[in-house]
Image (spheres, grey):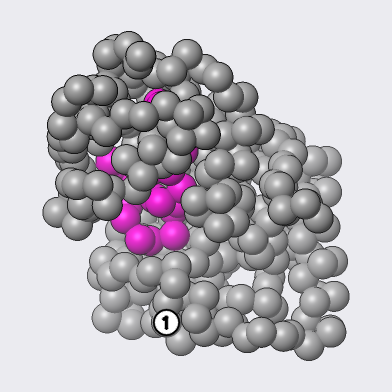
Amino acid sequence: MVEEKMVRVRVPGTTANCGPGFDAIGIACNIYNELELTLKPEGELVITVAGEGAANIPGDSRNIVWRSVQHLLRKARINCQGAHIKMQNNVPLSRGLGSSAAAIVAGLKAANEAIGGRFNNDELLAMATEIEGHPDNVAPAIFGGVTISVVQEDGQPACLSFIPEIPLKLIVAVPEFSLSTRSARSVLPQTVPFHDAVFNVSRASLLVAALCRGETRLLRQAFDDALHQPYRAALIPGMYEVFKAARAAGALGAALSGAGPCLIAFATKNADQIGEAMTAAFAKEQVKSRYLVLNIDSQGAQVL
């Protein structure tokens, strides 16, 4: 029998890819969604949503948080068809800051706590990857920091999380329009040229090494990409102009955040100047946007 107790969790938004680390590198950001969950074995499903994207989030069994709760309960062989769910969203919806990953991880983390913490974080990562399809956003949402994720030969995900030796600021330009991950993936080719693969392997390796060693100088070479950004540029007006403006204002580099359309710059100073330059560059393309200055979250999903 499930105990009817309210569980509250907080999950960070995330940025993935970070330029060359397609589907492999992610970073947890200090922007959070909060979730309250009370399982109701004999009750009905009641979902309330406030904040970002509230009008577009289903309040019934289609809700991704509830689907994630049910996924975990099935793993635990528990049948519970009712719950009270209260979502407070601060992560922009369908913008490339891991809103779906935050929802999935929140549902799993809260449900796990509600049944007594039967599963560890590695097991939650496996469940989250089953639901999301890839681990690059769910891994940092669970573990915090910068994460390097792989899917092993048996299909199970694994990741390593670390805190960089560089005090990075993450400056995110958030355009008004949204872009689904499905649409952003649909423009990617099935194969890429060999030299593009080498280009990305070298830069992704340099990015991780520079973050671990604190080599700011080398980071300027590490954020470029040849595998996904060139194909997605047509979906985001002015993308490369925003990158150029960010670097001119002092950014170490800039990239598409996840599948977009958010664009993210990485810097150690001049955060507001960089954000203003990015939104100004978007404005020249008739794209309204705002910017966020974020830090790296070091804790990942937490029970409050």
Quadrant placement of the N terminus: top left
Q: Residue at x 61, y 52 (%)?
A: 136
Q: Is residue 150 magenta?
A: no
Q: Which residues are magenta?
A: 89-111
Whether residue 235 is visible to the viewer of this picture, yes or no, is yes
Residue 90, percent from left and from top: 30, 42
Quarter of the image where one finds residue 66: top left
For numbered disc 1, what is the local secondary structure? helix
Quadrant placement of the C terminus: top left
Residue 159, percent from left and from top: 72, 42
Q: Nearer the viewer, residue 69 or 158?
A: 69
Q: Amino acid at mark 1?
A: Leu
Residue 217, percent from left and from top: 78, 54
Whether residue 137 is visible to the viewer of this picture, yes or no, is no
Residue 45 in the figure: left or right of residue 118: left
- Count of numbered circles on the image: 1
Residue 67 position (above or below residue 179) = above
Q: Residue at x 28, y 70 (%)?
A: 177
Residue 212 in the figure: left or right of residue 121: right
Residue wearing tag 1: 235
Q: Nearer the viewer, residue 173 or 220?
A: 173
Residue 93 in the figure: left or right of residue 157: left
Q: Is residue 101 magenta?
A: yes
Quarter of the image where one finds residue 231: bottom right
Residue 169 position (above or below residue 123) = below
Residue 213, percent from left and from top: 83, 41
Q: Nearer the viewer, residue 170 or 202?
A: 202
Q: Nearer the viewer, residue 292 or 51?
A: 51
Q: Residue at x 50, y 28 (%)?
A: 76
Residue 142 position (above or below residue 188) = above
Q: Residue at x 39, y 50 (%)?
A: 99
Categorize mark 1 by other alpha carbons within 10 Å: few (<14), some (14-19), many (20+). some
